[in-house]
Image (cartoon, grey):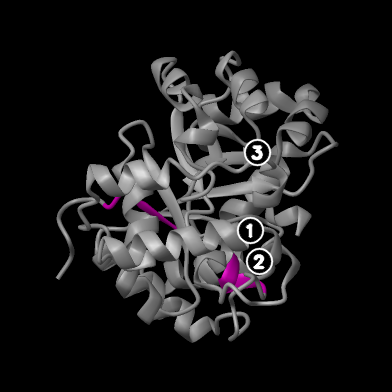
Amino acid sequence: MLKATESKIILGTVQMGINYGINNTTGKITDKDSHSILEYAFDNGIKTLDTAKVYGSAHSVIGEFHKNNPHKKFKVITKFPNIADDNIHVKIDIYLNELNINKLYAILFHSYSNYEENKNNLNSIIKLKKIGKIKYIGVSVYTNEEIEKTILDKNIDIIQMPFNLLDNNNLRGNVIEKAKSKGKIIHSRSALLQGLFFKNINDNTKVVKNLKNEIELINKISLRDKISILKMALGYCLKQKNIDNVIVGVDSLDQLIHNIESENTIITDNTVKSIESILINNPNLLNPSRW
């Protein structure tokens, strides 16, 4: 039975195309398991996917699912790897063909620097938006400074930014509220920070060593408030009124089921206060590309 209401969760598909995640012990998800995940997600209210050309075979996995399930077509967000050429319309047609859809929900640039490098291609992308091949244009950002720049850019519809138990409102300040007030659609990513919150605090990984005290604090809040780290991590992101959607990737169908169950978690104000008392002095520690 299909769920009537649409979930706030967007399903990330990187694990369907490549081996990804600091806490991923099983590697790339098989195509068969990926299709089971996609079907369960769609039937349970998740109607949007986040993918990218650089996510290995993710495009073709999604496309094959759509081919086999023509009545279960997702809205798809994908990203350019780099586009410093004039063949934008050709690339978009290739993406649509691979994904087996006739319109992209959004096309995103992987980073703000990638967006700036390709400003000369923006008119071509806007034309594709006008003829209905793309609904929204977006940028994936990392810092508050980049968010401030995208807020001022009328061509940007979607801002995709990190937000989680450590990359929290304490770090973000009022920049998300400001973006929302300017009509931007806000998607958060890294809700589980690649599974970092579930790592043993005595793990020898460099990033765990650097964030040992903060991970320990998360564990203490979880125990004190009798809430699992998963439910606390997803619940905190989903609770944010200025975040429209939360992107969450999975390694298995079981993980997806638990994530969907977490959507109904009620996070108390006391728990939120404790989460937002955690202050990271070096935001670079929260950027997986620097691990």
Magenta part of the protein: which range? 7-18
Amino acid bearing label 3: Tyr
Estimate how packed mark 1 is, as few (under 14), some (14 to 19) or many (20 or more) residues with alpha carbons within 10 Å.
some
Q: Residue 208 carries which label?
A: 2
The stretch drawn in magenta includes residue 17: yes
Question: In the image shown, does 48 or 244 lie closer to the viewer?
Answer: 244
Q: Can you see residue 71?
A: no
Whole-percent x, y for residue 260 in the image: 29, 65
Amino acid bearing label 1: Leu
| 1 and 3 marks in contact (CB < 8 Å) | no
* Residue with the mark numbered 1: 211
Q: Quadrant of residue 171?
A: top right
Question: In the picture shown, does residue 40 fall above or below 186?
Answer: below
What's the residue at 41%, 48% (across, down)? 246
Point out the tag, 3 or 2, that comes first from the N-terminus: 3
Q: Can you see residue 271?
A: yes
Question: In the image shown, does 171 or 175 lie closer to the viewer?
Answer: 171
Measured in 3D between alpha carbons, the distance from the residue under mark 3 to the one under mark 2, in whole angstroms, is 20 Å
Q: Is mark 3 on a helix, strand or loop?
A: loop
* Residue with the mark numbered 3: 142
Whole-percent x, y for residue 250 in the image: 47, 70
Estimate how packed mark 3 is, as few (under 14), some (14 to 19) or many (20 or more) residues with alpha carbons within 10 Å.
some
Q: What element carries label 2?
A: helix
Q: Quadrant of residue 207?
A: bottom right
| 1 and 2 marks in contact (CB < 8 Å) | yes
Whole-percent x, y for residue 75 in the image: 41, 50
Query: Foreground mark, 3 or 2?
Result: 2
Query: Foreground mark, 1 or 3?
Result: 1
What's the residue at 60%, 84% (across, down)? 25
Estimate how packed mark 2 is, as few (under 14), some (14 to 19) or many (20 or more) residues with alpha carbons within 10 Å.
many
